[in-house]
Image: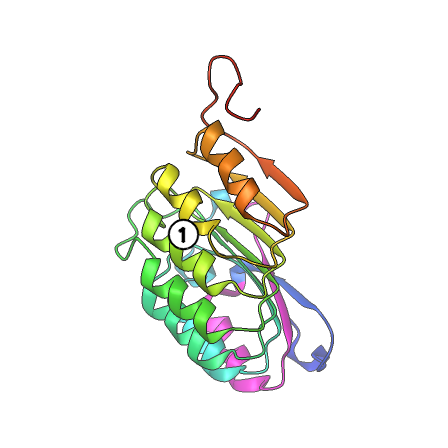
Amino acid sequence: LLSFSSLSFFSIEQTRNVIGDRGLGVLANSCKKLRRLRIERGADEQEREDVEGIVSHTGLISLAEGCPELEYLAVYVTDITNGSLECMGRHLKNLCDFRLVLLEQQENIADLPLDNGVRALLRGCHKLKRFALYLRPGGLTDRGLGFVGQYSQNVRWMLLGYVGESDAGILALSKGCPNLQRLEMRGCCFSESALATAVLQLASLRYLWVQGYRRSQTDSGLL
């Protein structure tokens, strides 16, 4: 667990997600000047069912309201809501690097898709240069990907997992993101031809890594 007495303004503080929502509440009340926080998934988290040891939208809201100077946040969560992302967009104006992974510990996530929350986060955190969102099918629609493209004006590196519904999603994203240089996608549902079209529209793109796209029988789509 995190030792609050060791926190400094500029250090990267790291803990496992057994800190839980309760621990994040204590952190938010005690470390108002915290700028960087990484919450890792512990090696044994798949075996745990300890309610006190999970991070959810509740903890994220506490963190956003209590630590407004955060510049870097990487977190694994068991549950997430649009409201918690909107809260971060309102409070974390200095956020430059945001990475969120939605775990599969909880079968049903009531507030998916996260289209409106992601839009509010990106609109509010206009300093973002690195953005990672690893969800599950249904977590972000094609409309949500359009918001990502529209409001990622300064993002240079992006990782997306299990987002979108059809080729329309990646095409909508590629109409924006004017400064995007590196794009990684996992659990990708898009076709070769849509990926090729998107690459041509992302003028600043220098690197693309994709896992799980829909291949054509001849691989002619990419050509």
Q: What residue lies at 46% left-to-right and 65% top-to-bottom? A: 151
Q: Is residue 201 above or below residue 63?
A: above
Q: Is residue 37 magenta?
A: yes
* Residue type marked 1: Leu
* Rendered location of residue 127, percent (x, y): 58, 73
Q: Is residue 174 above or below residue 4?
A: above
* Rendered location of residue 23, percent (x, y): 50, 72
Q: What residue lies at 38% left-to-right and 37% top-to-bottom? A: 167
**Residue nearest the viewer, comparing 119 with 170:** 170
* Residue 106 in view here: yes
Q: What residue lies at 51% left-to-right and 85% top-to-bottom? A: 29
Q: Residue furthest top?
A: 218
What residue would you read off at disc 1? Answer: 145
How was the colour assigned to the protein in this rendering? rainbow
Q: Which residues are magenta?
A: 19-45
Quadrant of image for the C terminus: top right
**Residue nearest the viewer, comparing 114 with 8:** 114
Q: Is residue 59 above or below residue 31?
A: above
Residue 61's quadrant in the figure? Answer: bottom left
In this rendering, position of residue 20 left or right of residue 16: left
